[in-house]
Image (cartoon, rainbow, N blue to C red):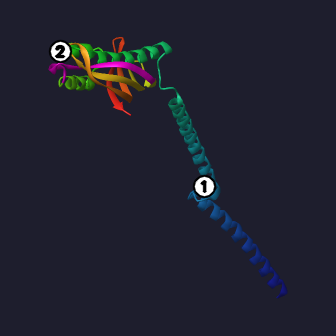
């Protein structure tokens, strides 16, 4: 009886070990096939992370390039070209003031067309049409530029910020003589210009 008891005990123990080993192998095989093995998940996550890291690096590089481009000067003109731009702007104002001494609208249009173009040209003409045909012009003197600086510019267009002052009186076009009371004006303006042929013409102005 005692031998039979020990034999059964040993047999049951061996069968338990065998079942344990078989169960472990079966568990590992099933979950590897179903893709639910945790080490495999970590490996895939690591690969995805590497791809995202590459994308993030590209995005950071693009951002840095964009910031570099934005930090670059918006004036794509040489020193000589900048001086020509500012000179043409000042000359354009001089042409406008001088045009107000024209004896008729034909002469006014001809003069101002050398300094202005587009809608602002038409606006100046419309304003002059209210006075010049009546023999009334303007006499501008003591023009002083406090500041003229280029905000942005390329080879064909530019924006300038300017502040200047001047004295103005009515002008009798028939007698060609200033009349009336003097008035002092101070102007702060942002002007847009476009290059046509070799000259810069004013296309728009915004009073600041």
Inspect this view and state whether residue 62 appears.
yes
Q: Is there CB contact under 8 Å for labels 1 and 2?
A: no
Magenta residue check for 133 = yes
In the rendered structure, the answer to whether residue 145 lies left or right of residue 25 reads left
The numbered disc on residue 41 is 1
Image quadrant in which the N terminus is located: bottom right
Image coordinates of residue 202 in percent, x first then y, are 33, 21
Q: Is residue 161 visible?
A: no
Outermost residue on the top side: it is: 198
> Residue 136's spot in the image, x, y percent?
20, 20
| Residue depth check, mark 1 versus mark 2: number of the one nearer the observer | 2
Q: Residue at x 50, y 15 (%)?
A: 79
Viewer-closest of 191 and 22: 191
- The percent position of residue 141, horizontal first and vertical second, equals 35, 18
Q: Per the image, is 56 magenta?
A: no
For label 1, the SS is: helix
Residue ID at (77%, 81%)? 8
Q: Is residue 191 left or right of residue 25?
A: left
Taking depth in this image into account, of 17 and 171 the one nearest to the observer is 171
Q: Please identify the dominant SS of the magenta region.
A: strand
Magenta segment boundaries in residue numbering: 131-147
Q: Earlier in the sequence, mark 1 or mark 2?
A: 1
Q: Please say if 114 is above or below 163.
A: above
Split into 4 quadrants, where in the image is the C terminus?
Answer: top left
In three-dimensional space, the C-alpha distance between marks 1 and 2, rounded to whole angstroms, equals 88 Å
From the viewer's perspective, tell me whether residue 112 is left or right of residue 53: left
Q: Residues within 10 Å of mark 2 (few under 14, many from 20)?
A: some
Residue on which disc 2 sits: 104
Q: Is residue 4 above or below residue 42?
A: below
């Amino acid at each position: 009886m005692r031998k039979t008891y020990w034999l059964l005990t040993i047999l049951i123990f061996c069968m338990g070990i065998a079942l344990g080993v078989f169960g472990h192998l079966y568990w590992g095989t099933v979950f590897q096939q179903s893709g639910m093995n945790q080490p495999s998940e970590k490996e895939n996550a690591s690969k995805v992370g590497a791809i995202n890291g590459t994308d993030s690096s590209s995005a950071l590089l693009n951002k840095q390039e964009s910031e570099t481009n934005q930090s670059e000067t918006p004036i794509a003109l040489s020193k000589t070209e900048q001086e020509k731009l500012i000179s043409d702007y000042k000359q354009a104002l001089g042409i406008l003031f001088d045009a107000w001494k024209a004896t008729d609208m034909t002469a006014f249009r001809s003069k101002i067309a050398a300094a202005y173009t587009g809608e602002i040209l038409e606006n100046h003409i419309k304003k002059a049409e209210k006075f010049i045909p009546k023999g009334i012009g303007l006499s501008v003197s003591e023009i002083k530029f406090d500041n003229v600086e280029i905000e942005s510019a390329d080879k064909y267009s530019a924006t300038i910020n300017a502040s200047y002052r001047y004295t103005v009186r009515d002008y009798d076009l028939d007698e060609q003589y200033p009349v009336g009371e003097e008035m002092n004006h101070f102007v702060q303006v942002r002007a847009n210009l476009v290059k046509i042929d070799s000259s810069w013409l004013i296309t728009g102005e915004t009073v600041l």
